[in-house]
Image (cartoon, rainbow, N blue to C red):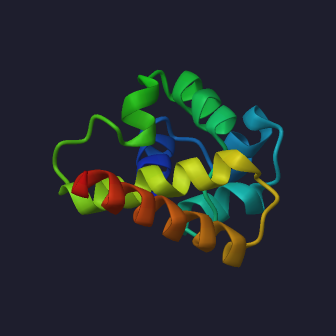
Amino acid sequence: MEISQRIKEYRLEKRYTQKELADLLNVKSSTVSGWELGRNIPSIEMIKKLADIFNVPFDDMAGVTDSSHNSNDELTRNQKLVAYSIDPDISDEERNDIIEMVKIAMKNRRRV
């Protein structure tokens, strides 16, 4: 399950509206909407706050401990988190470039 789905699932379990969750996080409701739609990825700090609000381990919130997905999905999620944590203000194109660099580095590491 992608982080976007986790945010929505946990939010609905707690019976929060997007606005209520946004208020708890001091962000706009459009930010929460963007996360849930997969348009944006929350920063590592926001993932920590989400985990605290939903009372779940960080690894569960971030999807690290989700064994229901194959390694390619997990790798992509982790690559996105790494790229986003470098600078949350980078463009989608720059983030995709970083993800591609991470993929290349990981591929080269496996060859050694």
Q: Could you tell me which residue is drawn at 76 percent across and 71 percent down?
A: 91
Q: Could you tell me which residue is drawn at 83 percent across and 38 percent down?
A: 26
Instruction: Kindly indicate the quadrant of the structure image that contains residue 45.
Output: top right
Instruction: Kindly indicate the quadrant of the structure image that contains residue 63.
Output: top left
Q: Nearer the viewer, residue 90 or 40?
A: 90
Q: Nearer the viewer, residue 32 or 108?
A: 108
Residue 31 versus residue 96 in the image, above or below = above
Is residue 9 visible from the viewing direction of this image?
yes
Q: Nearer the viewer, residue 85 or 28?
A: 85
Q: Could you tell me which residue is drawn at 74 percent across and 58 percent down?
A: 31
Q: How many labels sit on residues? A: 0
Is residue 3 visible from the viewing direction of this image?
no
x and y, in percent, of residue 4 in the image: 48, 57
x and y, in percent, of residue 109 in the image: 33, 51
Residue 65 versus residue 17 in the image, above or below = above
x and y, in percent, of residue 99 in the image: 53, 65
Q: Could you tell me which residue is drawn at 81 percent across and 46 percent down?
A: 27
Instruction: Kindly indicate the quadrant of the structure image that contains residue 95.
Output: bottom right
In the rendered structure, the answer to whether residue 18 lies left or right of residue 58 reads: right
Residue 12 versus residue 103 in the image, above or below = above
x and y, in percent, of residue 98 in the image: 60, 64
